[in-house]
Image (cartoon, rainbow, N blue to C red):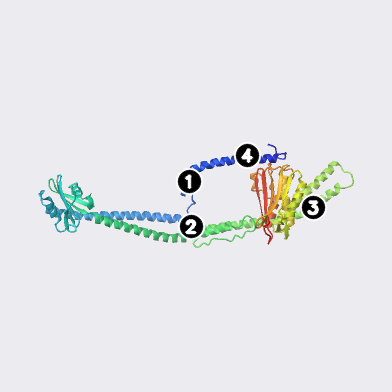
Amino acid sequence: MTHPGEPGYAAASRAAHAREQADAAVGADASGRTHASGLGAVLERTPFARGPWTIRRRLLVLIAGLLVAMSVAVGVATVLLFHASSVARLDASLRAASSRADTAAGTGFPADALATVQGFLGVPGQPEGTLGGLVRGAASTAAYIDDGQIIEAGPAATAALAAVSPDGTPHTIRAGALGEYRALAVESEPGVRVVLALPLADVSAQTAQLTVTVVLVAAGGLLIALGAGSLVVRRSLEPLERVTATAQAVSELPLERGDVDLDERVPVDEPGTEVGRLGTAFNRMLGHVASALSAREESERKVRRFVADASHELRTPLASIRGYAELTRLHGGSLPEDVLHAIGRIESESVRMTELVEDLLLLARLDEGRELVAGEVELGPIVADAVADAQVAGPDHEWTVELPDAPVVVPGDEARLRQVLGNLLTNARVHTPEGTSVVATLTTDASSAVITVADDGPGIDPDLRDTLFERFARGDSSRSRRAGSTGLGLAIVRAVAEAHHGEVSVDTEPGRTVFTVRLPLAAGAARRD
């Protein structure tokens, strides 16, 4: 590739940049497909991709979790204890009923076993639903009480009673369609067992009713606790919200420059609490920041005043030096060549120093809000004149101007706006190689006049973009510098644009650099592009 300043460099830079963009697009497309089909796409669809929870939500969830855990523990323990005590009472009733049945059954296995079962089930005091049976070996007979009537039980219930072990311990059985029972077997004589069972339906129903009651009470208590907890948490976090609101208000203040009135403070009602101590510390910090900003502004004011005064005072001696140098050079007598060269250098350096002093004086006055002459300025002739002057100063560049048909009028200072265009075009001429094409364009949008200066030079180093509009910022080696520069040109462009309530920006890449200045249109000016 050619080097800056050589013919064909700009075109070669644009071609190389186009190839880099194409390669980057292919790589980005491939990596994007890989990411979308991998773990990244899954994570983007999960709830973990959402933002963090607030402290209020975390506290409420924590309170709800603790209440649910406590309610579950208390409810389960209550239901289990109630069920166990109900079964114990049923077992006591079962033992009493079994004793009565054993006494009424007598000994041996009678020929009419069903009559014997009906007999001991008919003993006064036997509860409704009682199931009884008589078992000897493989022979068994069973019956149950249903609405005061003693009815022979089916095969499933009879088999369930026959399976109960005569160990003196109540057992839970499933008596077919009759449901669950607590059964107790008593051996009246070897090989003969009297089995009695009481239904668990009432116990199960009471346990289910208690479970529903506990769940409803726990849910209602949880809702009430969450409502009260939300109010308590909200009131407790109000001081923290005031700290947040104050910090937000401070963050929106223009602290970067000027005299900042930092009066925001956090109201502290209870300084002894954690949030109160935070508010007190925050207020103390704001006080220190306000003091530091005031000291900074005072220091900057002194520096601006010194620069303005020094620049003003230097104008006269520099003009005298330049005048005496010109007078000596124009003297009719003959002077040695080295003396003429020295005088020429003194004259040229005095001119450069005068320009530097004028730029410093202008920036100092703009910082103080002065040096603007109010009036309506038509930008078309200014852009055209600036491009014409640049074409004379840089004939090796290709200069183009694009203007709208209708006039574009803005309020401002014509001399300073001419300086903006001159500095932008000078920047394009000085920092780009010969043969570079520079296009100055004037357009409008809904409320602004837009001036752009675009060139197809090598672009601006990314490390320089953040400081490009600062004072004494210098271009890097990628933008050829064939002439001296004070580093104040773009700083003046930004200062003048902001003084006109506008803005300036830059968009750069290898092969294309565009400076854009936006200025508000004059009142009543319509969009004409």
Which quadrant of the rendered structure holds the C terminus?
bottom right
Rendered image quadrant of residue 225: bottom left
Nearer-the-camera pick, 287 or 333: 333
Mark 3 or mark 4, earlier in chain? 4
Report the Cα–Cα distance between label 1 and label 2. Answer: 37 Å
User: How many residues crowd mark 2 within 10 Å: few (<14), some (14–19), many (20+)?
Assistant: few
Amino acid under label 4? Arg
Q: Are marks 2 and 3 in contact (CB under 8 Å)?
A: no
Residue at position x 47%, y 55% in the image? 55
The residue that disc 4 covers is 19
Mark 2 or mark 3, earlier in chain? 2
Mark sitting on residue 274: 2
Residue at position x 12%, y 50% in the image? 113
Q: Please tell me whether mark 1 or mark 3 is closer to you in this view.
A: 1
Q: Is residue 310 visible?
A: no
299 displayed left or right of 77 = right
The residue that disc 3 covers is 317
Report the Cα–Cα distance between label 4 and label 1. Answer: 34 Å
The residue that disc 1 covers is 43
Q: Is residue 143 visible?
A: yes
Mark 1 or mark 3, earlier in chain? 1
Amino acid under label 3? Pro
Task: Tell me where residue 193 appears, x and y as whole percent.
Answer: 14, 48
